[in-house]
Image: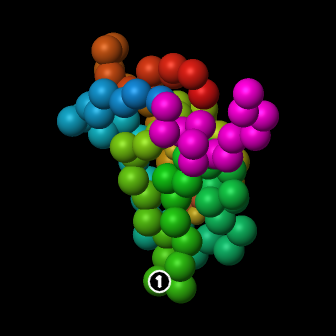
């Protein structure tokens, strides 16, 4: 019996139906002036990436947890759920 599974393995068992209508947008101009960048640590799917140049975001692996909207102190995250029938389907993870 497997007793340990890392995050990547757990994420890999989820199923996604990517919506062409982007359900989360991030104002990366605001992110460029943000020091704490809480979203990077808060996102369990690592949709936010931080670098010297700023913050990039991709919605495709989103788990729809809502954390990024809650932790952003600058209102940079415009968040909705995907349309019905799209987004993540949790399987065994
Ligand atoms: S916390 Fe908000 S403003 Fe800061 S980097 Fe993340 S999304 Fe951008
Ligand atoms: S809703 Fe959750 S999983 Fe999706 S981008 Fe925001 S923090 Fe990441």
As drawn, which residue projects farthest toward the left?
A: 20
Q: Is residue 17 visible?
A: yes
Kindly identify the residue that appears in the image at 31 percent across and 27 percent down: 17
As drawn, which residue projects farthest toward the right?
A: 3
Q: Locate residue 74, reporting x and y percent.
A: 61, 57
- Neighbor class of circle 1 (other Cα within 10 Å; few <14, some 14-19, many 20+) is few
Kindly identify the residue that appears in the image at 52 percent across and 58 percent down: 48
Q: Locate residue 88, reporting x and y percent.
A: 43, 26
- Residue 56, relative to residue 85: is it above or below? below
Is 20 one of the magenta-colored residues?
no
| Horizontal arrangement in the rendering, residue 76 relative to residue 2 (left or right) | left
- Residue 13, relative to residue 74: is it above or below? above
Q: Which residue is nearer to you in this view: 46 or 53?
A: 46
As drawn, which residue projects farthest toward the top?
A: 84
Q: Is residue 32 visible?
A: no
Picture quarter with the C terminus: top right
Q: Quarter of the image holding residue 20?
A: top left
Residue at disc 1, secondary structure:
loop
| Residue placed under numbered mark 1 in the picture | 53
Tell me the magenta residue range.
1-13
Kindly identify the residue that appears in the image at 39 percent across and 53 percent down: 58
As drawn, which residue projects farthest toward the bottom?
A: 52
Q: Quarter of the image holding residue 26?
A: bottom left
Q: Locate residue 57, reporting x and y percent.
A: 43, 58
Picture quarter with the N terminus: top right
**Number of numbered callouts drawn:** 1
Q: Locate residue 71, reporting x and y percent.
A: 69, 48
Is 11 one of the magenta-colored residues?
yes
| Horizontal arrangement in the rendering, residue 47 relative to residue 87 (left or right) | right
């Amino acid at each position: 019996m497997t007793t340990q599974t890392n995050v990547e393995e757990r994420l890999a068992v989820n199923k996604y139906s990517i919506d062409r209508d982007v359900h989360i947008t991030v104002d990366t101009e605001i992110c460029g002036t943000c020091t704490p960048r809480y979203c990077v640590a808060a996102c369990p799917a690592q949709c936010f990436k931080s670098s010297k140049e700023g913050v990039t975001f991709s919605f495709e692996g989103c788990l729809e947890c809502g954390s990024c909207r809650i932790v952003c102190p600058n209102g940079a995250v415009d968040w909705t759920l995907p349309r019905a029938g799209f987004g993540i389907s949790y399987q065994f993870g």
